[in-house]
């Protein structure tokens, strides 16, 4: 069972020395070999999606446990470790840091062919990769800019995403984990964990369950057509004016009027601390162009809306604010990263240590280390780093 967890790490500017990376690759290859032999490729993918286990694996491979570089270096080391053994192990690792992340779709397609994965399944994996990046850059508006995206998948179709963003203002990194078996909806609570060194007071989280009504209204707005939507945009641009009107929105895109929505009475005093007060709703030709595109497409649901090329953070934020300020559908403004430590604290701050999860992670990785073909001295050092 995958546990949700938070691991603390700050933003660091250092580089991994070549000698350390070589050792991480060597030990990583042995660890992957043993773990897949013992538990199978699908279980390995599941464990990668666990932020606590992922952090522990990086520690075993000798990287600083609390450094942001653990994510990028561990992913690169594992990718290099299985190079040439992908079909033997039954897994593939695609993407990485910076420009490498943009090659993820091509790498997934290439490995899908080599591993004899059906074309529809490979296309679905590419879609999931793109959507995970879209969600964490557009729907989770937490100020952390994504710079790393890695997609892990097995021959059987199990997949995990590990991506990371940085926030230079708070000097911290944040890692987002996804696991295919835990996801029922790509835009509704899709994460298996979000790791962060800092939590923020206000985060617009359109992937939260509390934002369900916002997602519903946003979809209805674009289904109703461009002219109607732009009237609402104009209302936001004049949000300080006193309004009291009625509007009907077609839900479902089938032409039937099934829900009546009442416009709120917009007065500056009502929203003196509302995010709309800080939003720039001056005329934006690009935003209007994107809204014209999505209204023309008339997506069936919110996921289809978000998947449209060109739809990003500003587009979904504009729709969310229309939904809240005009129709009263408030989204979640809670930071999805709750805590800043991996397993709790010994003094029960912010919560008691989750000993079971902690011990299970240590036991699995320690057992794998012992079964590797490494010299005994290297095994002892790896286990010492873990415990």
Image: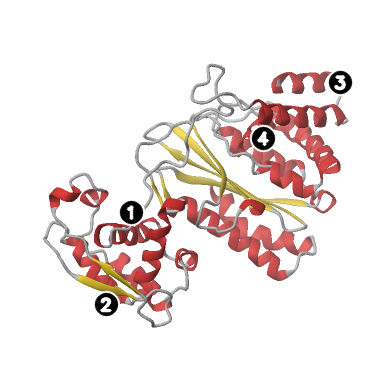
Residue 158, percent from left and from top = 71, 54
Mark 3 or mark 2, whichever is nearer to me = 2
In-image side of 32 versus 269 (left or right): right
- Disc 1/disc 2 C-alpha distance (Å): 23 Å
The quarter of the rendered structure image containing the C terminus is top right
Give the crowd class for mark 1: few <14, some 14-19, many >=20 residues within 10 Å.
Answer: some
Distance from Cα at disc 3 to Cα at disc 4: 23 Å
Tell which circle, 2 or 4, labels the residue nearer the N-terminal end: 4
Q: Kindly identify which residue carries mark 2.
A: 227
Marker disc for residue 376: 3
Q: Nearer the viewer, residue 318 or 69?
A: 318
The residue that mark 1 highlights is: 330
Image depth: mark 1 or mark 3 in front: 1
> Going by the picture, which residue comes out furthest to the left?
242
Q: In this view, does 294 lie above or below 6?
A: below
Q: How far apart are marks 1 and 3 (CA)?
A: 58 Å
Structural distance between the alpha carbons of marks 3 and 2: 71 Å
> Which residue is the site of mark 4?
53
Q: What's the distance in space between the residues labelled 2 and 4, CA to CA?
A: 50 Å
Whether tag 1 and tag 3 are in contact, CB under 8 A, the answer is no
**Can residue 95 be seen in the rendering of this structure?**
no
Where residue 75 sits, quadrant-wise, is top right
């Amino acid at each position: 069972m995958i546990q949700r967890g938070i691991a603390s790490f700050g933003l660091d500017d250092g580089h991994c020395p070549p000698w350390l990376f070589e050792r991480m690759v060597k030990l990583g290859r042995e660890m992957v070999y043993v773990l897949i032999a013992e538990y199978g490729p699908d279980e390995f993918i599941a464990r990668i999606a666990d932020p606590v286990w992922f952090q522990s694996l990086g520690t075993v491979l000798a990287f600083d446990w609390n450094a942001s570089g653990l994510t990028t270096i561990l992913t690169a080391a594992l990718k290099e470790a299985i190079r040439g053994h992908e079909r033997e192990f039954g897994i593939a690792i695609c993407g990485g840091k910076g420009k490498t992340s943009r090659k993820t779709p091509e790498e997934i397609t290439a490995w899908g062919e080599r591993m004899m994965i059906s074309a529809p399944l490979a296309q679905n994996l590419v879609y999931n990769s793109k959507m995970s990046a879209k969600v964490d850059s557009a729907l989770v508006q937490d100020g952390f800019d994504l710079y790393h995206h890695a997609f892990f998948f097995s021959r059987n179709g199990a997949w995990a995403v590990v991506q990371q963003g940085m926030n230079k203002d708070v000097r911290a990194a944040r890692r987002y984990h996804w696991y295919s078996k835990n996801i029922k909806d790509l835009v509704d609570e899709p994460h298996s964990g979000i790791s962060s060194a800092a939590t923020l007071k206000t985060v617009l989280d359109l992937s939260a369950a509390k934002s369900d009504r916002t997602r519903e209204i946003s979809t209805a707005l674009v289904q109703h057509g461009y002219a109607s939507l732009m009237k609402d945009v104009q209302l936001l641009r004049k949000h300080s004016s006193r309004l009291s009107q009625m509007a009907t929105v077609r839900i479902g895109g089938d032409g039937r009027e099934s829900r009546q929505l009442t416009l709120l009475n917009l007065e500056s005093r009502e929203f003196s601390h509302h995010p709309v007060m800080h939003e720039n709703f001056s005329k934006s030709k690009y935003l209007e162009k994107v809204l014209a595109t999505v209204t023309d497409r008339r997506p069936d649901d919110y996921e289809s809306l978000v998947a449209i090329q060109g739809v990003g953070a500003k587009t979904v934020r504009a729709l969310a604010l229309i939904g809240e300020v005009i129709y009263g559908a408030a989204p979640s403004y809670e930071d999805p990263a709750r805590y800043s430590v991996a397993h709790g604290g010994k003094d029960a701050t912010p919560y008691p240590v989750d000993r079971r999860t902690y011990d299970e992670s240590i036991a699995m990785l320690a057992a794998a280390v012992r079964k590797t073909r490494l010299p005994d001295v290297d095994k002892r050092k790896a286990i010492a780093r873990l415990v």
